[in-house]
Image (cartoon, rainbow, N blue to C red):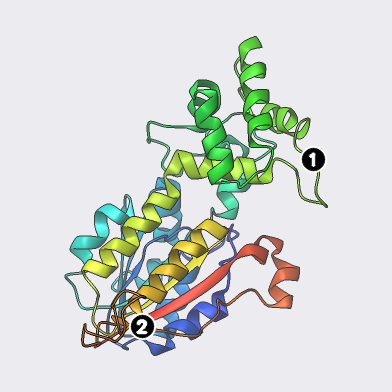
Amino acid sequence: MNEKIPHVPVLLEEVLRCFEAMPREGFFIDCTLGYGGHSEAILEKFPKIRLIGIDRDPEAIAYATKRLAPFKERFEAKQGRFSDLLPSLLTLPVAGVLADFGVSSLQLDKKERGFSFLSENLDMRMDPEAPLSAYEVVNRYPQEELERIFREYAEERAYKRAARAIVEARAEKPIASGLELAEILGRVIPKRGKTNPATALFQAIRIEVNDELGEIERLLDILEKMPPKGAVVGLITFHSLEDRLVKQRFRKWSTECICPPEAFRCSCGGGHALGKQLGRKPVTASASELKENPRSRSAKLRCFKFKE
């Protein structure tokens, strides 16, 4: 391809190592296809794997389809939410499931997508056709709802001050851009180090717009109800709340005994584990990747292998 690839896939080598443990034949489901970086590497490394890529973003689907054209016999793209599409796909002989819950660099960098502090609009939708955008959240949510988002998703101590600043500003005129919102929040949130003080609050709004935590929980629920035999699951998170969801669920899936903690002795008979975690701690970016791609600093990869 002559076009410049707009997105460097995070933890690429680590992802490939994670899936060394999967069967060498069957279907691989990339739940967050993005611009096809992880999928391209999987298709190159595992020549007998067939890959299905899912993404909400039609621009990403179009780009990845073009990028992965050399693998068209083994690749298929599907647009939509992975929580809607995954149940039917798990009826196939699935070897691996990958999800990278981060927003792609192109989505962040393209000002018209309305994700960044420099955006001239407020959007943040991964699916441009979705009904809820950041504009509606910022300009129409009651102050109590804004407080909830900032408290729960940003874990921001000054959540009340931030919500009040938005409500006061929008009473004068609608907040129409990322630039305006960043300026409003920057006046009331103390600066910590080099990070823009509005970073976590922007992320919290994006999580609300795209129901990101709900999607992760639904993905985990589906895998728990329909565990693909022998498959490896690799999940990349960028937020402490996301990582907590994955960590807790993987721990549950690895537990043989499901008796309550207060039980004097095991009465369930054990053998309830769905599989095992591959590595006790999450994998994070190497020093060289951090240098080349600073956005990888918060990425954590956890891997799990289901029983045969």
Residue to which mark 2 is pinned:
305
- Neighbour class for label 2 at 10 Å: few (<14), some, many (≥20)? many
Discs 1/2, front: 1
Question: Please, what secondary structure does the residue beneath circle 2 have?
Answer: strand
| Amino acid type indicated by mark 2 | Lys
Q: Residue at x 67, y 65 (%)?
A: 297
Residue 210, position in %: x, y? 44, 43
| Amino acid type indicated by mark 1 | Pro
Question: Please, what secondary structure does the residue beneath circle 1 have?
Answer: loop
Image side of residue 278 versus residue 226, left or right: right
Direction top: furthest residue: 172
Instruction: Give whichever of 173, 51 is nearer the camera.
Output: 173
- Neighbour class for label 1 at 10 Å: few (<14), some, many (≥20)? few
Instruction: Give whichever of 18, 3 is nearer the camera.
Output: 18
Visible residue check, residue 62? no
Specify the quadrant that holds the C terminus: bottom left
Is 115 situated above or below 37?
A: above
Q: Residue at x 46, y 38 (%)?
A: 209
